[in-house]
Each structure stands twice: as structure tokens, then as C-alpha cells.
Image: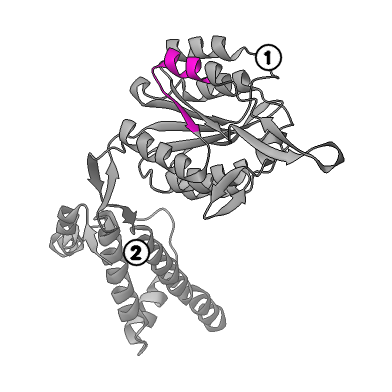
Amino acid sequence: MNIVLAWPWMLAALPLPLLALLLPAATETAPPALRFPYVDALRATLASSPSQAPRMRLAAAALAWLLLVVAAARPQNVGKTVHLPVTGRSIMLAVDLSGSMQTPDMRSGGHAVSRLAAVKQVAGDFIEHRAGDRIGLILFGDEAYVQVPLTLDRDTVRTLLDEAQIGLAGTQTAIGDAIGLAIKRLRDEPIKNRVLILLTDGASNAGNIDPLKAADLAAQEGVRIYTIGVGADEMVVPGPFGMPQVVHSDLDEDALRAIAQKTGGRYFRATDVAALTKIYALLDKIEPVSKDQQSWRPVEELYAWPLAAALLLSVLIALSAGGWLPRIRLAEVRHA
């Protein structure tokens, strides 16, 4: 712990109670309106009592004053210096969860994996090292919805991306709705930092917004869109009677390319995990992580502790002083 005093000059108040010794004693200018006979008995009792209670109360009062002054000086626990980027990108990832994303035509380490599994693997690594960027996640199918709003918590974004499942948002592809939702979420961000990375393996066949009109709106709002087409160009699947047949991808590359061009972004094609990894590496160069940093030190205020201790001592002093009165009254009654 690194404890410092924010207002050390408050310690100058420590000797103030000693000024009471220099003040002249109060004189009685008029007889009291009410007289309490037990006051003289109280003074006599305190003077003759061998108890150390008055001295203890004086010591407790001195300690309580010391704690109050220390609390007024604002003790703080100053933590280690933390470095944060001054500015970072605001990146929305829009991931297609339509039924075709389960097609196992992507290669990773010599094994066939689904398109969504490849996206999770590579996009997860991309998210991991975007320190300082605010990242959000949109999942889309028949509809688009925000799974994670823009946040600096990259671990949460990656975890929820890993938990995404095919068909969670429907089986079709609403690209225009995904772009429109991303624009809404990025609208309040600095205009130079608004970025959308859209990953899909098909053509837009659902939703209420035309993808190209959404791209025009994104261009007006200063949102750069990088589109990534996922999946092999063609693959061999079992056909009728077990005969193999070639199935071509329904990816609308022309539309994805137009969306990117309208907004000042770029279109990429990923046919395997290696190609997808290269795309994200290129995105890191196009939209680099901010290198400028600002430093700050977390501060924890500690004044509450001495303040609470001083309050507790004050209560104990009051209770201790009040305990003399019942015994004196009882002694006076018996004497009478």
C-alpha cells in the first residue's frame, strides 16, 4: 500500500485544543436561574475518586481529535500507474448465423471445420489483441440484434461470440438490418473511429432494409464497412442416389464489394482459416490500434476509517461520562 495525505496542511489543526488552556476562565456574572445540588456532589466525587476514568476519557478525547484531523487530511491509497490508450477504434463485428454457416468447407490444421467455427477462431484472436478499442458484437439471421454493446471488455465479447449458435437469429440473412443496427450503435462515437466488420457467407434474403441503401446511410454517418465473404467457392456434396454433386456458393460478392466501396472500406474473400487470418492481420494494419497513451493512478479514499474510529470514541466518551450521574443522584437520595 502507498498511503499519502491529499491535504497534509490540515495537520496544522492538531494543537488547536491546547489553545483552551490559554483562554481565561469563565466568570459567573449572574446567579443561575436553576440550581442543581448534585453538581457539587459530582465535583467532590470526581476529586476524591481513585478511578482513572477521567484520565482515560481525556486520552480518548485526544485520540479522537487526532483521528478527526487525520480524516480531514484525506488519507489515500494510491495504486500503481496504469497506461491506457488516448483514443481507440469503435468496432462492431456483425456475424452471420444463418443455416449455411454450418457448412464444413473451411480448412483448419488439415481438418474441415464449419464456417462459423472458423470465424469464431480467427475473430476471437482479432478481438483479443485489440487493446484500447471498444468492440461490440451483432448477430444476424432473419433479424439482427446486439449481443454485446460497445465495450472495452474484450473477454466478454469473445466469450459471447464463442457461445453463438447457428439459427440463433434465424436461418436467413438480413445484411441490411445488421448494417442499420451497427450504424445506430456507432452514431455517438467519434466519426473517425467508426468501423463495422461484417462477415457473411450468403446473399441478403431477409430484413427490412436494403443492404445498398444501408451502405449509403453508413457513408453519410462516417461508418467504414469492411465486408468479408466466408466459405469455399464450391464444394462436393452427396446427391441423389449417393452420386456426388458440386454445389456453388450463393455468396453475393458484388453486393458486399459495393457496400465496402460506398463506405471507404474493403471487401475480402476467405475460403479457409489461413485466408481469414491474413484478412484480420491486414485489418490490423488498415485500422491500427492506437499507440498514444495516457497514464493515471487509481486512488482509494481512506478517510472514512479514522472518521468512523473518532465517532466511536466520541460515543464511548459520552457513555462513560454519563455513567457518573445515576450513582451521584442515588447517593444524594440516601443522604437526604
Image depth: mark 1 or mark 2 in front: 1
**Residue 77 location, quadrant:** bottom left
Q: In this orientation, does residue 20 appear?
A: yes
**Of the image marks 1 and 2, the number of the one nearer the N terminus:** 1
Quarter the C terminus occupies:
bottom right
Rounded to the nearest angstrom, the CA distance separating label 1 from label 2 is 62 Å
Secondary structure state at the residue bearing disc 2: helix
Q: Quick check: is 97 in the magenta stretch?
A: no
263 is within the stretch colored magenta: yes
Quadrant of res 54: bottom left
State yes or no: discs 1 and 2 in contact (Cβ < 8 Å): no
Q: Position of residue 300 (x, y in %)?
A: 34, 56
Does 252 sit above or below residue 220?
below
Q: Is residue 18 left or right of residue 79?
A: left
Q: Which residue is mark 2?
A: 306
As displayed, is residue 288 above or below residue 22?
above
Q: Nearer the viewer, residue 36 or 230?
A: 230
Residue 305 shown left or right of residue 273 in the figure: left
Span colored in magenta: 256-269
Q: Amino acid at mark 2?
A: Pro
Q: Residues within 10 Å of mark 2 (few under 14, many from 20)?
A: many
Question: Residue 51, labelled with which disc?
Answer: none
Residue 319 appears at what percent x and percent y? 47, 71
**x, y (%) of residue 328?**
48, 78
Residue type pointed to by label 1? Asn
Determine which quarter of the picture holds residue 137.
top right
Q: Which of the numbered marks, if any, corresponds to residue 208?
A: 1
- Residue 186 shown left or right of residue 106 in the figure: left
Nearest the eye: 243 or 205: 243
Q: Label 1 crowding class (10 Å Cα cut-off): few <14, some 14-19, many 20+?
A: few
